[in-house]
Image: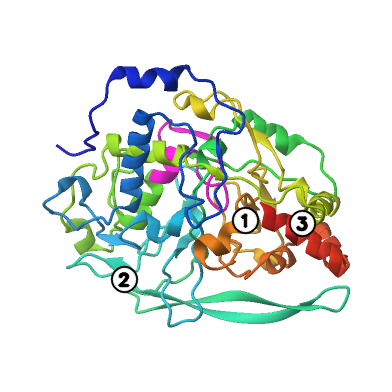
Amino acid sequence: MRGIRRPGWHWLCLLPWLAAPAAAQDHLVRDASREAYALPFPGLGEYELQRFRAGRGLFRQVWLVAPARDESIDGLGPLYNRLTCIGCHPNNGRGRAPEGPEERLQSMLVRLSVAGRDPHGGPQPHPAYGDQFNEEAIPGVAGEGRAAIEWEYREAVLADGERVELRRPRLAFRELGYGPLGEFRHSLRVGPPVFGVGLLDAVPSATLEALAREPKPDGVRGRVNRVWHVGRGETVAGRFGYKANTADLRQQIAAAMVGDLGITSSLFPAQNCTPAQAACGQAAHGGEPELTDAQLDEMEFYFAHLAVPARRGADEPQVRRGEALFAATGCAACHRPTLKTGVHPRFPRLSEREFAPYTDLLVHDMGEGLADGRLDYEAGGREWRTAPLWGLGLVERVNGHTELLHDGRARNPVEAILWHGGEAQAARDRFARLPRAEREALLAFLRSL
C-alpha cells in the first residue's frame, strides 16, 4: 500500500494538542544555527511530532524513477528540475543564482508562457515546453534543454558618493529538446524560504482585501492577486509565489511537486508533458496519483508547523534606531511588520495569533528595473508580492550567501533596496539619501530579523 506508515500511537496523544490554546509566541524558536529555518513549533505533542517528521522525510526524500522497489517514493519525472524538494530550498532556506553561464540552475527555475491566458485566467503555457522549463528527464525521455545566465552590471551612486555595483541576469536557452521557443515570456525564480508558511496561509482573505483598501503614503497601492483555487474550483486571493499566484499552502506544495519533480497528486493528476513531448507522455508512472493524499497531508502538516526564528538583538540602540528608520523611509508601508491569523479549520496552533513577517502579501508595481513582463493572473509584468523579511539576518548562516529578490540578482540588502522602483521608488530614494551611519542602523535592523 502506498502512503505513510506512522509509528503506533494512542488517541489519548491527541488530547493535549486539541485542548491546548496557542501561546502567543510558540511559533518562534530561539535558534540562530544553520538549522534555524527547519525546526518545528515548540511544544508540539508526540503525535504532532510524528506527523512533522513524516512530512520532513518527504520534503528531503530523493524521489525515484518508476517502477521502483519502494512504490511510495517513485514516480520522478518524466521531466523534472531536481530529485528532491530540499534541492531548491537548502536547509529550508533560499536558493541562489549561478555565478555564470557554465553553472547550472541548481536551486532556481524558469517560468514560461505565451500570449493569452489559460481557461482560469492564469498564464498560457508554452505549447511545446509547458509553464516551466525542465532541464532534467528520466532515461528514454529528452530534457527540455539548458538555461544559462550571464550577468550585466551597472553602478548606482548614493547621496554621500558611495558607489554600489548592481547586476541583472540575462538568460539564454541552449540545447533545446523540442524545437525553437518562438515568441514567449520567461521569468527566473529562486527557491524561497519555506519556514512560517503555515502562518501566512492562515491570514484571512478578508484581511488581505482590507490591507489593499488601506490608504498608503507615496503612491503605494498594493492589491490582491486573484487566482484559481484548484481544490475548490473558484477564484480566490493568492498569497504564495513571487507574484502571489497560488491560493494556499496545500496547492503550493502539490504544484511544486508536479512542476519541479514531476510527481502527480489528486490536485494535479496529469503528468507534466506537452503534446510535443511524445516519449514523456508514454513513460512509466508511479501510480495515479504518485503522491497520495496521505503523503500530501503529511507534507502540509510539516510546512504548516515550521517555526520562525526569533529576532536577535532587537533592543540594541542601533537596531532600534534602524527600526524607526525602516518606518520613516516608507519601507513598512509594504513590508508590514505584523499580521494576524484567523481560525484555522484543521491546525489549531495556527489560529488567532499575531506574528511578524514584514509583508502584506499583496502585489505591488516595483518598476521597470525588476519587471519580467509576464502576466500571472491579475499580477502584471511589473508587479511582485512583497517578500517577507523575517529570518533575513540568518540567510548567510543557513545558506552560505546573502542573495535576495526573485532572481537572486541582489547580493545583499543594499542592492535589493536599490532595485526597488515603481511604488517603492520614494522609499528607495530616501534610503539612498541617508547618511552612512543611518544606513548602517537600518541594515542592523534588517540583520536582527
At which x and y percent is residue 205? 60, 31
Residue at the (29%, 35%) spot, across then down: 293
Q: Amino acid at mark 1?
A: Leu
Q: Amino acid at mark 3?
A: Ala
Tell me where residue 26 sits by quadrant: top right
Whether residues under marks 1 and 2 lie with C-beta atoms below 8 angstroms apart, the answer is no
Main SS class of the magenta portion in the image: loop
| Residue 267 visible (yes or no) | no
Q: Which residues are magenta?
A: 230-253
Mark 1 is surrounded, within 10 Å at the Cα level, by few (under 14), some (14 to 19) or many (20 or more) other residues, namely some
- In this rendering, which labeled residue sits more in front, label 3 or label 1? 1
- In this rendering, which labeled residue sits more in front, label 1 or label 2? 1
Q: Earlier in the sequence, mark 3 or mark 1?
A: 1
Is 232 within the magenta?
Answer: yes
Q: Is residue 98 above or below residue 315?
A: below
At which x and y percent is residue 59? 35, 49
At which x and y percent is residue 427? 81, 57
> Which residue in the structure is indicated by mark 3?
424
Q: Earlier in the sequence, mark 3 or mark 2?
A: 2
CA separation in Å, label 3 and label 1: 19 Å
Q: Is residue 24 left or right of residue 276?
A: right
Q: Is residue 103 left or right of residue 136?
A: right
Q: Earlier in the sequence, mark 1 or mark 2?
A: 2
> Which residue in the structure is indicated by mark 2?
178
At which x and y percent is residue 105? 43, 70
Identify the element where label 2 is drawn: loop
